[in-house]
Image (cartoon, helix red, strand yellow):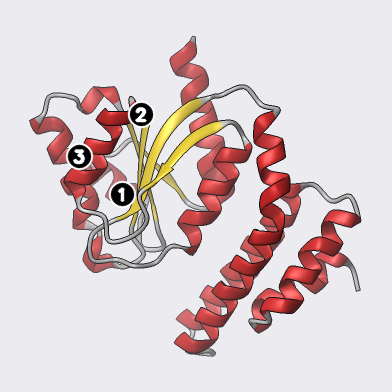
Amino acid sequence: MTALKSLIDAVISGEEGDAAAAANEALRAGLAIDEIIAAMTAGMREIGDQFARMEIFLPEMVMAAEAMKAAMAELQPEIEKSAQAIEKKGTMVVGTVAGDVHVIGKEIVVRLLRAQGFEVHDLGFNVNALDFVKKAQEVGADVIGASSLMSTTMPAQQEIIEILKAKSVRDDYHVILGGAPVTQDWVAECGADSWGENAASSVEILERVMTERAS
């Protein structure tokens, strides 16, 4: 069994110790950080699909999330090394909106962006819309990222946009949304700039945005 297959299986099974060991094995095998994270993300996507089909229930999903966190902890030193060798690309404030406590997807995005040279200020979860804006102004951010994993909390993403407009600073920030219920139609409706369908696409979008800003 390959190191990646072992890692995916451990994440899906919710085995924290096995996931951490498999992550280390993947590093020793010389696999790239982004390849390892992409494999785990695919595993979590499968878990999410199983949950949606009611083939598994919340405890199994939580166990898988904890296993992925354990694996990510093992990868963190290498992620930080990669970030140190890359020129800073931009500054981002990110969080999960008020009323929502989901963090796994956001944390993956944060780690990937830091590995690619972004300065990321992670506000955590259950973050008030005004706090996103205050922090963005405080740190001189280029990007605000708002994650919502429940349709009932999606209006909080729009509230961030409305606050930016009210403060006459909407054009100062690229606002990217994330989360399972988010769609391109919602991005257009609420007035955001982009949608990160997954961690990898979020990084690609923001790298392109910062390149365009610099030109």
- Distance, label 1 to label 2, CA atoms, is 25 Å
> Label 1 neighbourhood size at 10 Å, few (<14), some (14-19), many (20+)?
few
User: Label 3: which residue?
Assistant: 161
* Mark pair 3, 2: CA separation: 15 Å
Horizontal relation, residue 119 to residue 99: left or right: right
Residue 94, quarter of the rendered image: top left
Give the mark, 1 or 3, whose residue is nearer the N terminus: 3
Disc 1 secondary structure class: helix
Q: Circle 2 — which element?
A: loop
Query: Which percent across, then down, holds residue 134?
Result: 21, 37
Disc number at residue 141? 2
Residue 89 placement (x, y as % from top left): 54, 24
Q: Could you tell me if residue 20 is visible in this image?
A: yes
Q: Nearer the viewer, residue 74 or 162?
A: 74
Label 1, label 3: how many angstroms apart (C-alpha)?
15 Å
Report the side of 167 relative to 40 (left or right).
left
Picture quadrant where residue 23 is located: bottom right
Please name the residue that numbered disc 1 is placed on: 185
